[in-house]
Amino acid sequence: MNPLNTTEMLQKQMDNIKKSNNVTLPADDGRAFMQDVVASGSTLAKLNYYSAKSANGAIDMLGVKKRRLKLHQGINTTPDGTDHAEERTVPFSLVPVYTDAWFENDNVYYTARSRGQNVEDIIASMIQQQFGADLQDLAFNGDKSSADAFIKLDDGFLKLARTNVDTIKHDVTGAIKIADLQVVPIKVAPEQLRAGTFVWVMGRGTHTALQAEVIARPTALGDAVLVNGVLTRLHGYDIEVVDHIVEDTVLFTPLENLTVVTGFDVQYSRTGEGPEAMAKQATYHFVLSSVDFVIRTPKALVYIDADVTP
């Protein structure tokens, strides 16, 4: 394609994006959009994901049903399997959230031109990345009792873990040290340890402090693994470092125990019309959806912090 045609095509796309539009995405498109939002988060993408079909519902708890095989006895076989309705579930309740942004026309145009991408694809990617970053922040740090307008949108995994009576609490004094974590795995019941691959979930500052502690040791010990100078395992379990998570708090749990629930209703509105858009030389974009965060099996999670009641 020659440069003239490329320029004309981009200009048509820019003209189109400036037109006001207000749509609710089809259900499949809405699910795909939110799935891309979750996939854009570094840690968020590794968690369990559930696309809800209603604002309120329930998902299965984490764990493998044990010893379900039985001897078949022909006509004497009794169909005494557990009713699916009796299987253990955990509820969710979606919270409506939105993200909005102004995108300068020149920045969008030149980004699309340099990348060779469609203008709408560029904007969708920017929105999803911002939505994903905020969603990961809220997923771990959310607290409805907070005075912060963002943090109080919904309770995140740290708040859920701290307040749930079924999670295991491990108290430490001051900053978390490697020795503080040694006894944590044995606090988890054997049947829960089989529920998934447990990892340490922590913030970057906590990870850096533990890494420095390992490096400062006069001799290497078997409780920690350094790969190219980076602390990757503690007491036999991998480490998941989460950006923006509260420091000096650690979760010990399978990542699939932490679930991000999103709704399939996604409303997308945009406009490049009116005096404000003209003055800014930009288009305004608004995306409305809904989310919730769920710990599937609280007994398969250890919450580690100072002054926490065991």
Image: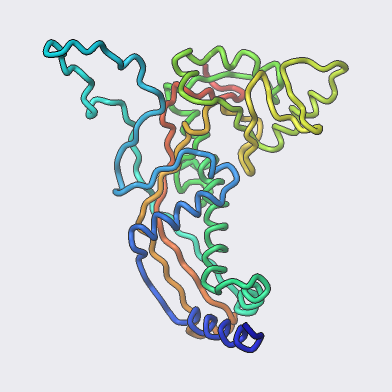
Q: Looking at the picture, how far across and down is residue 38, in whole percent?
A: 50, 49
Q: Quadrant of the N terminus?
A: bottom right
Q: Looking at the picture, how far across and down is residue 67, in whole percent?
A: 34, 14
Q: Looking at the picture, how far across and down is residue 57, in whole percent?
A: 29, 41
Which residue is more in the foreground, 268 or 174? Answer: 268
Left or right? Give the position of 20 relative to 198. left
User: Compared with residue 90, is residue 75 higher up or lower down, i.e. above or below?
Assistant: above
Q: Residue 214 is drawn in which quadrant?
A: top right
User: Compared with residue 194, is residue 148 higher up or lower down, i.e. above or below?
Assistant: below
Q: Report the coloring of the rendering.
A: rainbow
Left or right? Give the position of 36 relative to 22. right
Q: Looking at the picture, how far across and down is residue 279, in whole percent?
A: 58, 84
- Residue for point 40% across, 57% down: 289
Outermost residue on the right side: it is 218
- Residue for point 71% across, 32% down: 207
Which residue is more in the foreground, 261 or 49? Answer: 49
Q: Residue 81 is drawn in which quadrant?
A: top left
Q: How many marks?
A: 0
- Residue for point 54% across, 40% down: 46
Left or right? Give the position of 74 relative to 244. left
Which residue is more in the foreground, 29 or 269? Answer: 29
User: Compared with residue 94, is residue 82 higher up or lower down, i.e. above or below?
Assistant: above
Outermost residue on the front side: it is 74
